[in-house]
Image (cartoon, helix red, strand yellow):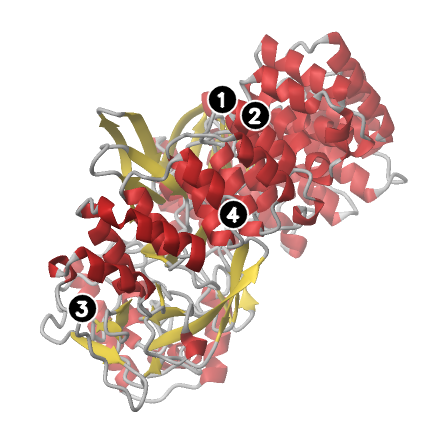
């Protein structure tokens, strides 16, 4: 099967594959003979390119910052752009992998990805990542360093760089001659948002890079024409392309007469390529597999496990291998394979892997083992056989990674049988650490929704856990809807002698549960409280209520006890914008000049403009003016005028910092200063005036990946806007501009839509003089190539 990077929204049905649905980034594969389609691994940030190294490990580049890309174990889940590309296909994944950690140049857009295994460069280059960075005109050379079962990277001296800002390397590959081939887009433009089709279509070029003193040369000709016996030595060729092509030729031609030689190469030389060829010939029998599971080469063992798992075959030897395996990537593959084979073997393998306490802090393995367990969660006899054993609960990986997730898995689905299984887990648990994890897992399952009727034993265990938390346990009782808990929580949140952390926690919980009796106390705290942090939390908590008095009270305190200090006014504006009646009252304040338009945050202005209610839309126009939307011709004219301004004289970067602070730092971060509402600006093509002109004059033309704003309207009329921080089949979590997260249940969401406009107005430069514009651009471009 050939994996391929993908970003569509799709549902695929093949004769041998049931409907497979996915959104956005994933690595998929399709078998041309069996016609089987499969998601190999899901996620991967904004996936660019794909690479498989000489040991068959899968990687991709990434259109993002602070990484060279992702490493994908089979069956894994990695981070996604949740807003653009939807939830993971598995609602019970309960976690995902991040990109490979990076030490080195963290500027964005090292998008392409190749691993050098060509044999021509010095030995220290072998296995390195070659990563073109079109944004900053260079080709990176980054070393892969094992990080547990995954990798981290460390940049070495760049493979190529140029002061020419037109140098745009967008692809790297290693040829059969051992040279590195670079595709150079060669264009001053890098973004695709300009209204003009002014690409330099004739200026692209291809480079071949080789070490000084070498002459890359390929002399083997067409391998398809070589006799079978001449293919065998090529399985040990120094160039990966040649080795892999020889493997494919052996398999495609069905040269079974080579099997004795291939067996010898696996046995005597630990040849992974020979093993692949045996498999392509359909000759990897259980007998061969059992023999090679005893190989002293970890990659031979790993690929035997992987290959049989691809055929959904489990062996008892896998269980014993999981118990004794010393190589961490073999253990990772055992976990991946445990998902694919019958529960009879899969759960036992996961149980043995959980005994490896040395993997507790591995970046990947605890989740890999969890995904193996989760895939067989409905095979209750096998789960019972594992978790009813006291020694299972002694394992640190069970206590810290598996117990809570398994409890959450059953509680999230929440059928009567599932809740009985939750009760059984509590009954079997012999570890205090694991018991707490079980309770936390159940609480996570019901976050944002009411508890159902629980089995008596389970309810008793939850009450016991709650009692151990003291006053902090009130938050649990609140979410269970206990009236007495609400009364006690209100008393504590109003008591200034109580710890601030407790009062903050209870204020949040009172808001989340929407208890009507809590509204008066929260509103009193929101209107005036000597502790700004508590006041701010109370203002946010009021978003869960709909009483008209909330809007009236908050508006009445703007400028007095709800001031600009500690971001209280901004927080209040964001709360007021969530309900139509409150939003209308806020706009009246602006229209009647009791609140200055510039005192309303830009994200609130956008939210107010986005209301479907025509009265609110008209008030927004009166308050903030007609939203400026330039035609393409006007945008081009504006960009031309600004270009002439920039060319007419020098700017003062120090003076430009003042303009940046006033206009840009409200949303963007540069040189360590500013906010995170919009994308950071450091890594962009800052020395290119055209980049800035397009982004400033037409900010909605290309909204940076991960910074798309969404608006959710709930059944009770509440409007929540912000970026989607997470989503699954049950809920959507939205992070607002003030970094507050709101989790909404899907069955309570009336509409969820992307907001078409950027937070950034199109007329940002209008209030600036020509000299101030030159000053601002001088500051923005500091330290960048021009």
As measured in the structure, the alpha-carbon distance from the residue carrying label 4 to the one carrying label 2 is 39 Å
Instruction: Nearest to the eye among marks 4 and 2: give it.
Output: 4
State the residue in front, 301 or 479. 301
Residue at numbered disc 2: 546
Number of dots carrying numbers: 4
Residue at numbered disc 4: 97
Residue at numbered disc 1: 716
Of pointers 1 and 4, the one earlier in the residue sequence:
4
**Mark 1 touching mark 4, by CB under 8 A?**
no
> Which secondary structure lies at badge 3?
helix
> Where 760 falls versus 323 (above or below)?
below
As measured in the structure, the alpha-carbon distance from the residue carrying label 3 to the one carrying label 1 is 45 Å
State the residue in front, 595 or 472. 472
Give me the residue at 59% from left, 51% from top: 363
From the viewer's perspective, is 356 left or right of 721? Answer: right
As measured in the structure, the alpha-carbon distance from the residue carrying label 3 to the one carrying label 4 is 46 Å
Instruction: Nearest to the eye among marks 1 and 4: give it.
Output: 4
Of pointers 1 and 2, the one earlier in the residue sequence:
2
User: Is residue 89 among what the camera can see?
Assistant: yes
């Amino acid at each position: 099967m050939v994996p391929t990077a993908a970003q569509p929204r799709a549902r695929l049905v093949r004769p041998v594959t049931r409907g497979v649905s996915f959104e956005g980034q994933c690595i998929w594969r399709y078998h041309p003979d069996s016609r089987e389609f499969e998601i190999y691994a899901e996620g991967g940030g904004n996936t660019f390119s794909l690479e498989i190294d000489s040991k068959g490990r899968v990687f991709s580049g990434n259109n993002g910052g602070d990484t060279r890309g992702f490493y994908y174990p089979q069956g894994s889940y990695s981070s996604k752009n949740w807003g653009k590309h939807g939830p993971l296909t598995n609602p019970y994944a309960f976690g995902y992998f991040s990109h490979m950690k990076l030490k080195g140049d963290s500027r964005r857009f090292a998008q392409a990805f190749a691993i050098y295994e060509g044999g021509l460069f010095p030995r220290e280059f072998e296995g390195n990542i070659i990563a073109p960075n079109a944004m900053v005109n260079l080709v990176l050379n980054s070393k892969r360093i094992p990080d547990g079962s995954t990798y981290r990277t460390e940049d070495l001296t760049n493979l190529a760089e140029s002061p020419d800002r037109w140098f745009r390397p967008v692809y790297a590959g290693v040829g059969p001659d051992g040279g590195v081939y670079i595709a150079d887009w060669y264009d001053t433009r890098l973004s695709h948002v300009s209204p003009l089709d002014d690409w330099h279509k004739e200026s692209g070029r291809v480079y071949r890079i080789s070490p000084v003193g070498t002459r890359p040369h390929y002399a083997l000709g067409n391998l398809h024409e070589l006799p079978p016996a001449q293919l065998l030595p090529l399985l040990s060729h120094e160039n990966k392309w040649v080795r892999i092509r020889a493997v494919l030729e052996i398999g495609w031609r069905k040269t079974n007469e080579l099997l004795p030689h291939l067996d010898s190469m696996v046995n005597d030389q630990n040849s992974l390529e020979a093993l692949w060829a045996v498999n392509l010939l359909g000759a990897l029998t259980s007998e061969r597999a059992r023999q090679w599971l005893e190989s002293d080469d970890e990659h031979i063992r790993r690929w035997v496990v992987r290959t049989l798992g691809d055929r959904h075959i489990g062996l008892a030897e896998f269980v014993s291998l999981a118990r004794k395996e010393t190589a961490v990537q073999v253990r990772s593959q055992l976990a991946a394979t445990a998902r694919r084979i019958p529960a009879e073997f899969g759960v036992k393998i996961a149980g043995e892997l959980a005994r490896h306490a040395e993997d507790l802090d591995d970046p990947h393995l605890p989740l890999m083992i969890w995904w193996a367990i989760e895939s067989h969660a409905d095979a209750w006899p096998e789960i019972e056989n594992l978790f009813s054993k006291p020694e299972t609960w002694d394992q640190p990986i069970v206590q810290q990674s598996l117990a809570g997730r398994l409890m959450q898995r059953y509680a999230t689905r929440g059928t009567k049988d599932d809740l009985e299984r939750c009760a059984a887990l509590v009954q079997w648990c012999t570890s205090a650490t694991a018991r707490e994890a079980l309770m936390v897992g159940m609480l996570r399952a019901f976050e944002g929704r009411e508890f159902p009727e629980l089995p008596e034993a389970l309810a008793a265990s939850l009450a016991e856990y709650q009692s151990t938390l003291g006053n902090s346990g009130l938050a649990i009782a609140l979410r269970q809807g206990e009236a007495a808990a609400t009364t006690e929580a209100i008393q504590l949140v109003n008591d200034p002698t109580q710890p601030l952390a407790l009062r903050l926690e209870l204020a949040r919980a009172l808001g989340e549960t929407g208890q009507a009796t809590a509204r008066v106390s929260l509103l009193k705290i929101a209107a005036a409280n000597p502790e700004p942090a508590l006041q701010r939390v109370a203002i946010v908590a009021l978003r869960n209520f709909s009483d008209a008095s909330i809007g009236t009270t908050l508006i009445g305190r703007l400028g007095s006890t709800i001031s600009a200090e500690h971001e209280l006014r901004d927080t209040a504006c964001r709360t007021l914008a969530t309900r139509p009646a409150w939003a209308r009252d806020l706009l009246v304040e602006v229209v009647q000049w009791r609140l200055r338009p510039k005192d309303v945050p830009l994200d609130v202005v956008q939210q107010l403009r986005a209301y479907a209610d025509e009265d609110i839309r008209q008030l927004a126009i009166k308050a903030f003016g007609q939203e400026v939307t330039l035609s393409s011709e006007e945008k081009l004219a504006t960009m031309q005028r600004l270009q002439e301004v920039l060319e007419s004289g020098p700017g003062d970067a120090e003076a430009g910092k003042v303009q940046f602070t006033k206009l840009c730092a409200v949303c963007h971060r540069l040189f360590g200063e500013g906010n995170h509402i919009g994308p950071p600006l450091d890594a962009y093509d800052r020395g290119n005036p055209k980049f800035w002109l397009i982004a400033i004059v037409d900010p909605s033309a290309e909204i940076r990946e991960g910074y798309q704003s969404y608006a959710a309207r709930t059944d009770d009329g509440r409007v929540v806007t912000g970026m989607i921080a997470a989503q699954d089949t049950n809920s959507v979590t939205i992070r607002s501009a003030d970094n507050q997260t709101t989790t909404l249940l899907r069955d309570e969401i009336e509409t969820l839509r992307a907001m078409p406009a950027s937070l950034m107005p199109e007329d940002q430069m209008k209030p600036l003089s020509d000299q101030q514009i030159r000053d601002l651009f001088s500051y923005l471009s500091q330290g960048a190539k021009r």
